[in-house]
Image (cartoon, rainbow, N blue to C red):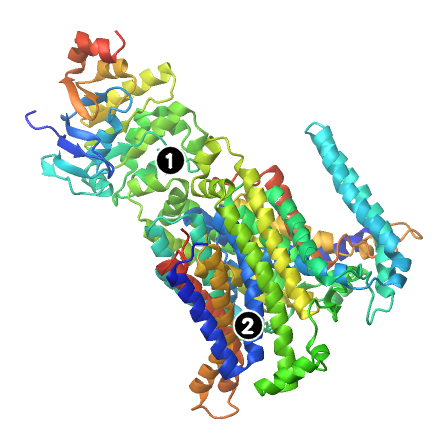
Amino acid sequence: MEPLNALVSVTNFMLIPAFAYGSQLALGALGITLIYSILRFAHFAHGDTMALGTAAVIGGTFFLQTLGVSIHPLPTALLALPFGMLVLIGYLLITDRLVYRYYRRVKAKPMIFVMASLGVMFVTNGITRLFMGVSETRFEDGERFLFSVRDFREFTGLAEGMALRSSQAITIVTALIVMVVLFWFLNRTRSGKSMRAYSDNEDLALLSGINPERVVIITWAITGMLLVTAGTLYGLDKGFRPFNYFQLLLPMFAAAILGGLGSPVGAIVGAYIVAFAEMGVTYAWRRVFTYLMPEGLEPTSMMQLLPVDYKFAVTFAILVVVLLFRPTGIFKGKVL
Amino acid sequence: MNLTARDLGLFALMGAVLAMVGMFQSPQLAITILNMSLISAIMALGVNMQWGYAGLFNVGVMGFTAVGGLAVVLIAQPPVPEAWAAGGLGIMLGLMLGVATILAAVAVYKAMSPGKMRGAAIFGVLAVGYLLTSYVFGPAKSAVQAVNPASEGYLGGLNMPVILAWPVGAVFAAGVAWVVGKISLGLRSDYLAIATLGISEIVIAVLKHERWLARGVNNVTGIDRPVARPVELQPLPWVQSLAETLGWSLSQTASVVSGLGYAGLFLIVLGLLIWLAERALNSPWGRMMRAIRDNEVSARAMGKNVTRRHLHIFVLGSAVCGLAGAMMVSMDGQLTPGSYEPLRFTFLIWVMVIVGGSGNNWGAVLGAFVIWFLWVQVEPAGRWFMELVTSGMADGSDLKQHLLSSAAYMRLLTMGVALLLMLRFAPRGLIPER
Amino acid sequence: MDKPVLIGEAMTGGYGGADILHDCTIAVDKGQIAVIVGPNGAGKSTAMKAVFGMLKLRKGSVRLNDEDITGLAPQARVLKGMGFVPQTSNIFPSMSVEENLEMGAFIRRDDFHETMEQVYELFPILRDKRRQAAGELSGGQRQQVAVGRALMTRPSVLMLDEPTAGVSPIVMDELFDRIIEIARTGISILMVEQNARQALEIADKGYVMVQGANRYTDTGRALLADPDVRKSFLGG
């Protein structure tokens, strides 16, 4: 029995990746929940918008690289983040102006907004692919590991190794910073409070002199920043393929619904639950149990509950359980 | 049926455009477009039932069509006796155990009072059930997949006439829809959207991964077709004389004839469905559905079980999508799970419905034709456009290469713009509801 | 007091279709309490909404401090010094009490902490619960938050749409006491009330409305004493 090795193994292959993935999902789910509480519709273009923002960051990264600009050991992409944000916020505001604003004005049903977001999804998808194609683009540079398996082994003397990829460390740190800043913004600033007020009670917000168009613009801007950050972190971690970003839609929605649509804290908690469930269920536990079980009783199978191809099934199962038993989510979304 | 002169004109125009494709591009292309348009029209009809009649937002069209396609394999393919011998029993038993586990969990949930005990009991049932199932299922699955994996490695089907697969595909899709609808109807309307989005991804994952079922990503090819293949037609004397009269090559004639055979079958199905859908729409039931759609609150207040009605229409619409999916697979003669993409099989259908006119069956059909035509033709048009744009550039330059290769994505853009423009400026579509 | 602070004069109009208000006049003097009572569907709330600009008038005018504001949007009227407390959803439930008050002062660019202090003095319970989400408070406390929110712009007129709907009699008495206190600070009060008898007791002026028109207009005490009013509207 070697519990320490088991712990190291599970941390290396399950906990760290899940934590990083959860952080990426959380930023995306926050965007969904914000749009939901302010514009009051399910934003189906979310994944593709994220891809577009990331594409802009990649473009910026390549440009910086040709200039020879680098912030080694950090990836150049971090330096290109502001550029990507500017591009994406601009894009979101233009789509809002051209598409959504009209439906707000005529007070269209939420489903019409969703339809419109489908159209935007197509367009965004097309634009992203025009620039990036469909194949995988890798744009990670800088130091690959904070510490590698070998470093760890040499340092601890354990048989099992553990590595911390810099993209994972950056993801976790960045996500935490972004979340702190977002909550500070929502809870402490006048604009943030006006957003919450608008989400709480639209009519009373109007009565109090809050300008809805301003709130909407702020919401898109924040969403843009969240999406670019989330998408870039995801791309650094796993490489950039537009279709993968589209597929993030389901886990992001699941996270937002699980936490309670409209609740930012819920979106974050939901995202980590989804991420850990996805990883935990599709992770082959054999190694861990080999360390944990007494000799001679080691498992022979992979000890994997579901193949990795079914990670969406895990997300979906979570979604089903939430819809069946607590449709308002963990943190009681305001609107149902 | 109530088509105005304008509607008929639109259809005639569409027909003329297709005829022009036949004349100026190639007859085969025109027939291919026609056949896919007919299938798309049936999918659009299914979506239109859900959205147009009841306001249900189904984002899982892809899943329902794929399940319908699976039916073709399971019905028409010959069984693989070695595979059945190797693990057929185990797989069947495993499936039954899986179902029994879920039923047992539900029974425990209903029988016990809420509390920690119930949670633990359900968890226990699920855990034991999972272990039992995988104990039985796992080895059987491996055994089946090991049987002649290059060409088989799956259980095969029932070796029945392929036409039978069409209604069966509808039933499969209906079954999946029932489960999804049971869970997510009656909640916020966007929850159904998200749930269907999820189920369609899962259906595709299952099709790709469960090789014992339909060979997964290895694809099942050479499935029986309901219409003679061009190769089989070529030796026939009447086909040969037809080719001579038209002055076409024999292979071209044969493929056009074969395609027209499909078109005939599809037209019959489409006609039947429209007839049924129109009758239903104008029956008391259809009026009630629309009343519910237009004012759910008052319909509820009048004692209508709205959720139940929604479940009916959701299952029906999904069944129609499943039927179309089965038809498509039997036309292609192959099931290729890797080719199912949500943009193509879910969202494109939505564009068809919105552009055609939600709430109007004829509109959905016309929308399917128009959008499928654009979908096929925008790519060459985009290519032509890109060639025009890049004609001044030096050959072999990276930018030129990139622009030319990305022409394919122009159609996504075009579809999105078409959808947005329709939604904004003609939200009732080409043939509005009346 | 020759000129009323706020007057909606000869108002006629409705929500698009048929007129709901017919030549209806509502006014309130400085530091006074005016109460609109009447049977259900008499157009009481509509009259108040008309004064606040949430309803398009076909005829008549609204004047605040002798300025014609008939054409102004509700938000603009808030800037001019009108405070409005809707009957329902009149707070931001997920925000704390203090944030609710801050949002009330959203259009103010100056320091509003003094006003907040005054609100806390008026409703001491709110000071104790300032960090709590307003949605978690009891019905009476929520009404206090709602009134406090409207006071944050330092309005010259405070309009209340059935402030005591759904609260217990004890809470109602307390709310009325507070409303009197607010009036004493010089703020004019215009309110619609279901609890006609209690409301008229504190009213300087009462309007009995029937079918969108003024039926009786007098001081609150006089209306309470009027046998016709008693018989028809106050249940004997």
**Chain of the residue displaying label 1:** C
Q: Secondary structure at mark 2?
A: helix
Which amino acid type is shown beneath numbered disc 1? Glu
**Count of numbered tags:** 2
CA–CA distance between discs 1 and 2? 64 Å
* Disc 2 packing (10 Å; few <14; some 14–19; many ≥20): many
Residue ID for mark 1: C98
**Can you see residue B229?**
yes
Residue ID for mark 2: B33
* Disc 1 packing (10 Å; few <14; some 14–19; many ≥20): many
**Can you see residue A81?**
no
| Left or right: residue B131 compared with residue C185 | right
Q: Are marks 1 and 2 in contact (CB under 8 Å)?
A: no
Residue at the spot 47% in from the left edge and 63% down from the top edge: B366
Quadrant of the rendered image containing residue C92: top left
Which amino acid type is shown beneath numbered disc 2? Ile
Quadrant of the rendered image containing residue C220: top left
On screen, residue C196 above or below A47: above
